[in-house]
Amino acid sequence: MRILASLSLAALAVASLTALAQTPAASKPSAAPQAPAKAKMAAPQVLVAKTPPMGWNSWNFFAERVTDKDIRAAADQLVSTGMKDAGYNYVNIDDTWEAERDATGLLHTNAKFPDMKALADYVHSKGLKIGIYSGPGTKTCGGYAASLGHEEQDAKMYAAWGIDYLKYDLCSFIPDVMQKQAPNDKAAQMRLMIAAYDKMGKALKSTGRPIVYSLCQYGWDAPWEWAPALGGNLWRTTGDIDPTWDRMYAIVSQQAGLEKYAGPGHWNDPDMLEVGNGKLSLAENRAHFSYWAMLAAPLLAGNDLTAMKPEIKAILTNREVIAIDQDKLGKQGFRAYSDGEVEVWARHLSGGALAVAVVNVGSDRQATHPFHLNLAKLGLHGVQKAKDLWTGKDVELTENMPIELDSHDVLLVRIAAPK
Ligand code: GLA
């Protein structure tokens, strides 16, 4: 049922976009056949998010407490910690910046954000970009004013402020519109949802400003099938992450199979990073970051950068792991195989290189029964020269090589010339 609904909605989205793309050609009194319009459709222009967006977002640590001051501090820290140089360039304000609309419909900021334009200027002055948050309903998830009925007005305001990134979160659109307008009709509800994302996509586009468009609707109705056609640059694939191994790994387990939908300009989003948050151990932080790199996931740090421990900074700024995530081929990794509690992921990289991640997802150390890597299952034959990206050491991978990994730890290697 759900698959059928997704397919027909995807077809509907594509059909409506085809109709839109063909309108100008059809209305032109021209002898030219339809072919050029079709060619335009096939190659959407990629302006932003050619590689998965990198930066920082306020939600995972600050949640509703975030203020203008925290955003400025995060921008300062991105620069002083070297994270900016490592590629983190978006500073994203999540929910709770909004006040109410005035009589003209203009949305005002609340006391925590006294001057959004000045804040955007400050972030830009650091050579960084700035992101903001809203949703298609009347209210955001935090209960603040959202964009329903004001999509164009809001998009123009973001552009005037100099906003570079919008996270658009479904939340109250579910009761406000989907359940109200189409009670008991899930397929119609999903069509309403897609139309709402399409509306904001168009509003952003019509501002003429390149703005990364991040869909946050928890993976409902297979957004990977229709979001790129609406101008979506990334789409959440699941519900919210939290800083625990179980939740992080539950999300990872839902990513296998989605790899074919990711590519330059459009990415699966398993949610923002929790590296450095909660009680994740160092091994768990490394594994979390490795998974996100293998998944070509957006790398949006979510920790308090003003109190970042050196070992957390070392994880977040590991250039060679970041290079896996940002590989220009844009091919998301896949789960190659699993064996008991150990799983092996592989990712094809530009230049014919291969990244391999071996993760002990079990809760017990396997010291007395080391895991044996099966190179043949990765399509590899004979000794492979590789680099261990967490120790920085050169290693040789051999068939049936015993690997000992602590619980929730990872071996992440890059094989420059796999054979
Ligand atoms: C939802 C999103 C989170 C965050 C909050 C803000 O739960 O999934 O990432 O944006 O809303 O209220």
Image (spheres, rainbow, N blue to C red):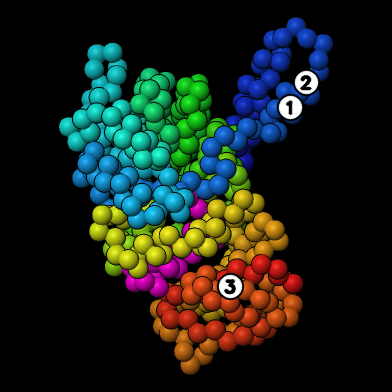
Q: Residue 117, position in %: x, y? A: 30, 27
Q: Which residue is mark 1?
A: 38
Q: Nearer the viewer, mark 3 or mark 2?
A: 3
Q: Quadrant of residue 346?
A: bottom right
Q: Residue at x 40, y 53 (%)?
A: 83
Res 13 seen here: yes
Q: Residue furthest left?
A: 111
Res 254 seen here: no
Q: Residue 111, position in %: x, y? A: 17, 32
Q: Which residues are magenta?
A: 280-299
Q: Residue 32, position in %: x, y? A: 81, 15
Q: CA distance from mark 3 to mark 2?
A: 51 Å
Quarter occupied by the C terminus: bottom right
Task: Identify the disc placed on residue 387.
Answer: 3
| Precedes in sequence: disc 3 or disc 1 | 1
Q: Which residue is mark 2?
A: 34
User: For mark 2, does the 10 Å Cα neighbourhood hold few (<14), some (14 to 19), or many (20 or more) residues?
Assistant: few
The answer to the question of whether label 3 and label 2 lie on touching residues, with beta carbons closer than 8 A, is no
Q: Amino acid at mark 2?
A: Gln
Q: Amino acid at mark 3?
A: Lys
Indicate whether 405 appears above or below 108. Answer: below
The answer to the question of whether label 1 and label 2 lie on touching residues, with beta carbons closer than 8 A, is yes
* Residue 241 or residue 351, whichever sits in front: 351
Q: Amino acid at mark 1?
A: Lys
Q: Is residue 32 left or right of residue 95?
A: right
